[in-house]
Amino acid sequence: MVFAVEFGGSTGAVPGVLRDLPRGSRCFGLKFGISGDNRVYYAADGDLVVYEEPWGPVAPLREGDARWDPAWCADLIDVTDPAESWGLKLFLLAERVMSVTIERSWFVRPLRTAELPDAAAFTNTSAWDIP
């Protein structure tokens, strides 16, 4: 398992980067925007399954995609309340999807680091295409 944090970057949000993941792997990504414009990404086997700004239950790009279980969203937010927002509850969704507990220490202790290419390298390329 790999847990990655990008500070000030968004390479992990580039659809082409998610599609380039090896077959047999899964990736769940979150992007928290300063203006509340949060994003959710999920890729499985090199295919983009979810890519959206979540308002209400998170849904797959292709209706009925068996790689997305709608039960993962159950009871995390009140989808009937238009004022309800996902916010940090997206971490709970990540735990359900990836079957892992996100540890507080992952955010406060030093972790192994790796340099990622700047997302600007993907500007105006097909890497941003969403199926």
Image (cartoon, helix red, strand yellow):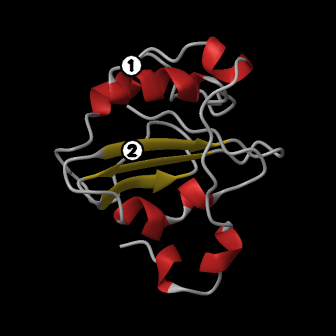
Q: In the image, is residue 18 above or below residue 44?
A: below
Q: Is residue 79 left or right of residue 113?
A: left
Question: What amino acid is found at the position of numbered circle 1 in the picture?
Answer: Val
Residue 49 % position (x, y): 32, 54
In this view, the residue farthest toward the right is 34
**Mark 1 surroundings within 10 Å by alpha-carbon count, few (fewer than 14), some (14 through 19), many (20 or more):** few
Specify the quadrant of the image occupied by residue 21: bottom left
Q: Name the quadrant of the C terminus.
A: bottom left
Question: Residue at position x 46%, y 55% from top?
Answer: 51
Question: What amino acid is found at the position of numbered circle 2 in the picture?
Answer: Cys
Q: Earlier in the sequence, mark 1 or mark 2?
A: 2
Question: Residue at position x 65%, y 25% from top?
Answer: 88
Q: Is residue 26 left or right of residue 6?
A: left
From this viewpoint, is residue 47 visible? Answer: yes
Element type at mark 2: strand
Residues at marks 1 and 2, CA–CA distance in whole angstroms: 12 Å
Specify the quadrant of the image occupied by residue 106: top right
Residue 14 % position (x, y): 54, 64
Q: Which residue is mark 2?
A: 27
- In front of the other: 121 or 29: 121
**Mark 2 surroundings within 10 Å by alpha-carbon count, few (fewer than 14), some (14 through 19), many (20 or more):** many
Q: How many marks?
A: 2
- In front of the other: 116 or 26: 116
Question: Residue at position x 38%, y 46% from top?
Answer: 59
Question: Residue at position x 21%, y 56% from top?
Answer: 23
Q: Is residue 7 left or right of residue 96?
A: right
